[in-house]
Amino acid sequence: MYVVCKDHVELAIDKFIDEYEKAPDIVDLQEVEFSAWEQPGHCDHCRQEARFLVV
């Protein structure tokens, strides 16, 4: 699972495919809220706002 900004979503997809050998689901964190999970405040790769969940 990767939490990334708009600039790093393609990198996260590539890493997911390399690791799991299948395409991930991509969730827009501005459109979905999870009650049992607190969204990180920033991208896994930089300090920009986290926008997408790649799972």
Image (cartoon, helix red, strand yellow):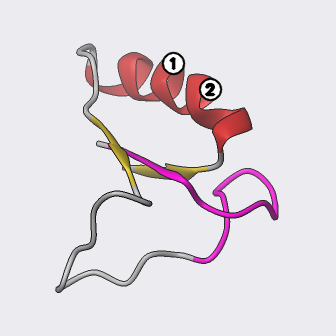
Task: Say whether residue 46 is magenta.
Answer: yes
SS at badge 1: helix
Range drawn in magenta? 41-54
Real-space Cα distance between discs 2 and 1? Answer: 5 Å
Residue 27 spot, x, y in % from top left: 32, 45
Q: Residue furthest front?
A: 31
33 to the left or right of 16: left
13 to the left or right of 35: right
Residue labelled with disc 2:
11
Name which residue lies at 47% across and 25% down: 13
Residue labelled with disc 1:
14
Q: Looking at the rendering, which quadrant does residue 7 occupy?
A: top right
Q: Amino acid at mark 1?
A: Asp
Q: Amino acid at mark 2?
A: Leu
35 to the left or right of 49: left
Residue 11 spot, x, y in % from top left: 62, 26
Residue 12 spot, x, y in % from top left: 54, 33
Residue 50 spot, x, y in % from top left: 60, 60
SS at badge 2: helix
Quarter in which the C terminus is drawn: top left
Name which residue lies at 18% across and 85% down: 35
Name which residue lies at 42% across and 17% down: 18
